[in-house]
Image (cartoon, helix red, strand yellow):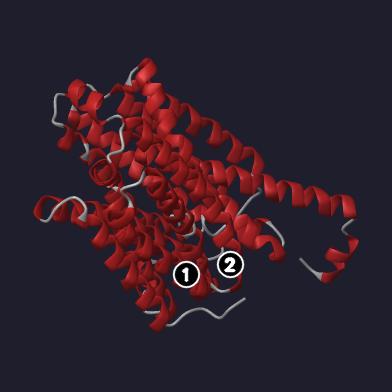
Amino acid sequence: MTHVEESTRTPLMQERSAVRGWSGVVALAFGTFTVVTSEMLPVGLLTPMGDSLRVPEGVAGLTLTIAGLVAAVSSPLLISVSGRLDRRVVLCALMAVLVIGNLGAAWAPGFGVMVVARVLVGIGMGGVWAIAAGLAVRLVPAKSVGAATSLVFSGIAVASVLGIPAGTYAGALAGWRAAFVAAAGLALVVLIALAVLLPRLPAEQAVPLGGLMRLSGNARVRTGLIVVGFVVTGHFAAYTYVRPVLEDVSGAGAGAISTLLLVYGVAGVAGNFISGAGAARSPRRTLLVIGAVMAGTLALLPVVGGSLLVAGVLMAVWGLAYGGVSVSTQTWILASAPEAREGASSLFVGVFNGAIALGALLGGLVADGTGITAVMWLGAALAVGAVVAAATGRAPADG
C-alpha cells in the first residue's frame, strides 16, 4: 500500500480492517483447535474403538501415531506443492480434507479404512498448522503480532483442555463414532468461517523443496528445530504415561487424575499467553525458562509427588511451562526466517509432530524396560538438552 493510499484511509476503514483481521485470527485459532482435537481424539476412545474394529488397544493406538507421522511428512510437501495459491483457498481445502477424514473414521467398518481416514486427518492437520502459524503477522498491525500469534496457538492449548475430554464425553454418551462425526461438523463450521472471515491471502512466495532444505541450513532455524525436538520429545515421553505415573506415585484414582489433568490443561492455556508475550521480546530467554522449569518439575514429580496437593502444584507448573512451548518455538522459527515464514513453519510442524511420535515411543520403551516413573527422568533429561541447545545455539535477535 502506498503512502497516498494510507493517508486516504478513513478511521472507519481502518477500524473495519482491524476487526476483519482479528476475526480472521479467531477463525485460525478455532482451526488449530479443530485439527489438534481431531489428531488427539483417539486418546480417549481407544477401548471402544478397538472393540468395534476388532483390534487390540495397542493397535488402535496407532491411529494417533499415523496421523502425527503423516502430518510430519506432509506439511513441508504441502507448502511446496501449494506454490502461490491463495492461502485462504488452501486452508479451506485442507479443512475439507479434515472433514472427510473424520467422517471416514466415523464410518470405518474395519481398521484398514480407519488407517486411510487417519492419513487424511494427518494431511489436513499438518497443512493447516503450517500455514496458520505464519498468518497472524499478515492480519494484524505489527504491534499486535505477538498477541495474535498467541491467540492462534491458544487453539492447541485449549484442545488439550476441552477438545479431547469433550470428545471422550461425546463417545461415552453416543458412541465413539459420534465423537468423530462431531469433529467433522466442527471442521465444517471452521471451513465456512475461514472462507467468510479471512481476506484474500496470496502466497508471499513459492517454496520449492530445495528451498526448504536450504532453510534447514539457517543456523537460527536449525537451533530452533533442535530445541523443538528436545523439549517436545521430552514432554511426550513423560506426558503420554502421566496417568500410570500419578497412580503409582500419588495413588490417585480416576477422578483425581481427571482433576489433575484439568489443572494441567488450564495452566497450559495461561502459559500460552504468558510465554507468547515473553517470546515476542526474547524467544531464547523464554525457552530457557520453559526448559528449566520443565526439567525441574519432571524430576521432582516422582520424588515429592506422593501428596495429591503437591502433585497438583507440580502438574500446574508443568502445564504453565509446556503451554508456552508451541508459541515460543514458533516465534523463534518465524523470527529466524522472516523472508520464508511458511517454509520455516512447515519444517517446524514436521519436527514437532515427529517429536510427538518419538516421545511416545521412547517413553514406552523406558517404561517397559526400567519402570514407569523413569519416563519422568527421561523427560527431564531431554528438557535439559533443550536448555543447552537454546543457550549455546544461534538465536534470533531480541525484539
* Picture residue at 82% right of the left edge, 54% below the top: 14
What percent of the width, then of the height, locates residue 12?
88, 50
Disc 2 target residue = 278
Can the viewer see residue 351 in this picture? yes
Q: In the rendered structure, which disc, 2 or 1, sits on the residue that comes first in sequence?
A: 2
Front one among 80 and 330 = 330
Q: Secondary structure at mark 1?
A: helix
Where does the C terminus fall, quadrant-wise? bottom right
- Seen in the picture, residue 25 relative to 54 is either above or below; the reply is below
Q: CA distance from mark 2 to mark 1?
A: 10 Å
Can the viewer see residue 73 in this picture? no
Amino acid beneath label 2:
Gly
- Residue 338 falls in image quadrant: bottom right
Disc 1 target residue = 289
* Picture residue at 18% right of the left edge, 22% below the top: 51
- Seen in the picture, residue 263 relative to 318 is either above or below; the reply is above
State if disc 1 and disc 2 touch (CB < 8 Å): yes
Image side of residue 340 versus residue 51, left or right: right
Where does the N terminus fall, quadrant-wise? bottom right
- Number of disc labels: 2
What percent of the width, then of the height, locates residue 233?
30, 60
Front one among 239 and 81 = 239
